[in-house]
Image (tube, helix red, strand yellow):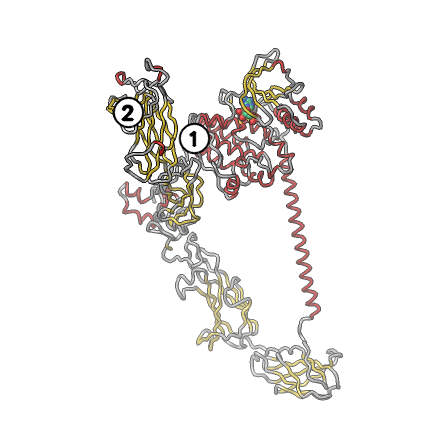
Amino acid sequence: STCVSVWEEVSIMDEKNIPIRTYQVCNVLEPNQNNWLRTDWIPRSGAQRVYVEVKFTLRDCNSLPGVTGTCKETFNLYYHESNEDRESYIKESSFIKVDTVAADESFTQVDVGDRIMKLNTEVRDVKVTTRKGFYLAFQDVGACIALVSVRVFYKTCPLTIRNLATFPDTVTGADTSSLVEVRGSCVNQSEEREEPKMYCGADGEWLVPIGGCLCSPGYEEKGSASCTAGFYKAKSSDPGCSKCPPHSHSLRDAATVCDCHSGYFRSDADPPSMACTQPPSAPQQLISVVNETSVVLEWTPPRRLGGRSDTSYSLECLICQTAGRLCLPCGSDVLFSPSQTGLKTTKVVVSELRAHTHYTFIVHARNGVSLASGAGATQSVSVSVTTNQAAPSPVSFVQATDVTRHSLSLSWQQPDRPNGVILEYEVKFYEKDQKERSYRIMRTFSQSVDVTGLSPLTVYVFHVRARTAAGYGEFSAPFEFSTNSDPFPLIGEGVNSAFLLLSVSGVGILLLISAAVFIISRRRSKYSKTKQDSEEEKHLNPGVKIYVDPFTYEDPDQAIHDFAKEIDVSSIHIEKVIGMGEFGEVCSGRLRVQGKREIYVAIKSLKAGYSDKQRRDFLSEASIMGQFDHPNIIRLEGVVTRCKPLMIITEYMENGSLDSFLRKHDGQFTVIQLVGMLRGIASGMKYLSDMNYVHRDLAARNILVNSNLVCKVSDFGLSRVLEDDPEAAYTTRIPIRWTAPEAITYRKFTTSSDVWSYGIVMWEVVSYGERPYWDMNNQDVMKAVEEGYRLPAPMDCPVVLHQLMLDCWERERAERPTFSQILNMLDKLIRNPGTLRRTVVPEVCVPERSMCEWLQSIGLERYRDTLAAAGYTSLDSLLGITHQ
Ligand code: AMP
């Protein structure tokens, strides 16, 4: 069989009467057949797992007259990896078996005459990673086969754009569970926000997008179309193009900023979203009040502030020969209070001016765009004043020299502002002990005086003042000197240090007090919040039955007695084993209670050799279930506790658990049917939450389905086991993929955490029993969820359903919907099936229809700039246009 092939190449007609070539073999009468048919070399082209789809017909051995035990109804598929593209002879033993292939569909006679030729189609996959290519071979062991076609292919995740990053067509991994990590690259006109990454799954579907890109400035997020005229986008992180702010416009596409209309400006610090503004007009109504050598200036704000609120004022001070003429800037000795520039107030006191002098004061108003609008453009108002005659300012420094037991020489400096010609100085002094009860006065034209006739070793206090034509100035501060010692001026006018200390500690105490008050009030409010929280949680609906925890019973048998009916074992008829529960087998059977018709039931039994705790846990499920009465909660028929084995009898659910049921019927239901199932589960969960029962293990595997596709919540076991076990948080018993983050991290199980699980069940249902988060491990799932990753919409999932899932997966549990809201939402969807039609499609960049396109389409594009200049830049804004 290795040299001469028994397989024959035969032309036949297919069902459409088109001739096709087949390979046939039909040595059914002779024993020990071993007939091989080999393909040419098939290059692997980078594939790691290839799929072989074989179409063939197989004859039923029974249909062949006179055949004995030699006839077979299968053939074998083999492969051999090789770098050689022209191997002429390959040993049988070099081939590795892929599978034995049997006819699945039908054993039809290849009755070409009657044009009946039902084909079998079988697909097998095999990992090919070691060589550049491979050969396939078909081994016949004595069947009657016609091979019609062999299609060899591999799967790729198709080129896609996600989060504005392009992911190339990617060959799937070698194993059915392996994910291929792929880096995306940002689409044109976009920039990387966070390294875009996705995984290519074995079935050619993209999974777990991470990171992504943002449209560049001037380009819009929705499909990276450029912003049209009249719009702009400043930063790539901005959500989209925005309309130009007031007094600005953009005439070209892809603007990153709008230009200001002429006469309007933007300061460097103004964001592009801010309107363009103008410098202020001049300050108004400047008035001056002269008081000796100081002037109080007051004005009112400008009439136009230019659209800004950062107006400030500055003062120019000019000293003039005659009123308002031949002016020079004032010296730096003039004082402005509060300041000369950057004034926010409209009042300034100018002091330390010269007496009898002409001044001109100019008040400028400016704002953030005064500089931008051009030099010298500030608007101002001015006033000219003449200061009055004024006495000299006080002498500021006095010193003593040549001190003896009875005399000293006193000298000083001229006052800072004499305000005229000094005619004389006056010195007043007295013994310190005497205070000012008796003092002496001396006068002099010079800036020093010898003071004699003093008592020895006595401290004297001196004050000096000057006199001009305008009169005496103020006395200087006190200067103290002691006779017959070195001059020893004390700090005469300093602040009392004791007071300083006191006041410093006073401020400290005040600070301490206010800090304490703050802390106390914070604590109070936090306390009251937690109190409120717990009150909210304990708030019960009046008139609604509340679930009673059977573990609060001292005697567990009492709980069972209260909530479950004892059934006589003789009325139960067990038929077959249908599953395996935690405590033992689950069987189906019939129950006939006197006076009622026979019903199908599921029977859970507790296997022999149980401990007290196991008995208690086993029966607790019945005690819990027995309290519920709702069409979407599995109904308890009763229990058997009087004889062994213990049994729990519930209604029978023909289709078993929801997850396996959906996997078995992949893709076979309408969206409305799926939503109907979800509605049932939500309704059951609403009932449980109204009863104040937290399920803690809501998952598709714990939903049972009956023959009418009604879904019922079951499995009331786990909750108790967890709570009583202090180690529970660390055991593997928490169903991580289904559990809300706060329940995983600090065991905060609430109805809101049940809502999270409900969202996962929704995902399981819409994806026909796919495992949430696929083959990611628990640690990665927790991390991804913590970082904000959420399961994507399953294939063909209506947008509204995925949005509802995302709502159930809000990080903040208070933000999640309640079961009653979920129920309302699903009811609404069922009533309006149109809303379910929109499914999640991969995002693409679709440019928005712009004003420009529209004008083009009606032949009026020449008006584009005119319209833009008038502020009509979008189709929306055109709606507001009037006849005027
Ligand atoms: P459980 O211990 O409740 O998880 O049950 C184990 C398995 O038995 C389930 O996964 C179901 O396949 C099956 N089963 C349990 N209760 C019923 C029921 N009332 N009707 C049909 N099958 C059931």
The reply, left or right, for residue 649 in relation to residue 865 is right
Residue underneath mark 1 = 836
The N terminus, quarter of image = top left
Three-letter amino acid code at disc 1?
A: Leu
Which residue: 61% across, 78% down? Answer: 394
Which residue is rendered at x = 63% and y = 38% of the image?
A: 727
Disc nearest the viewer among 2 and 1:
2
Residue 742 screen position, x and y as percent: 57, 40
Comparing 31 with 769, the one in front is 31
Q: Is mark 2 within 8 Å of ligand 1?
A: no
Indicate the position of residue 191 as horizontal and vertical percent values: 39, 50
Q: Quadrant of the C terminus?
A: top left
Quadrant for ligand 1? top right
Quarter of the image holding residue 571? top right
Q: Label 2 to label 1, Cα distance in Å?
A: 57 Å
Q: Where is residue 855? Give x, y as percent.
A: 30, 43
Estimate the x, y position of residue 163 in percent, counting from the top left: 41, 43
Q: Is residue 880 visible?
A: no
Q: In the picture shown, does residue 457 fall above or below 531?
A: below
The numbered dot on residue 6 is 2
Crowding at label 1, few (<14), some or many (≥20) Cα neighbours within 10 Å?
A: some
Q: Which mark is residue 850?
A: none
Along the viewing direction, whichever of 39 and 191 lies nearer the viewer: 39
Q: Is residue 240 left or right of residue 353?
A: left
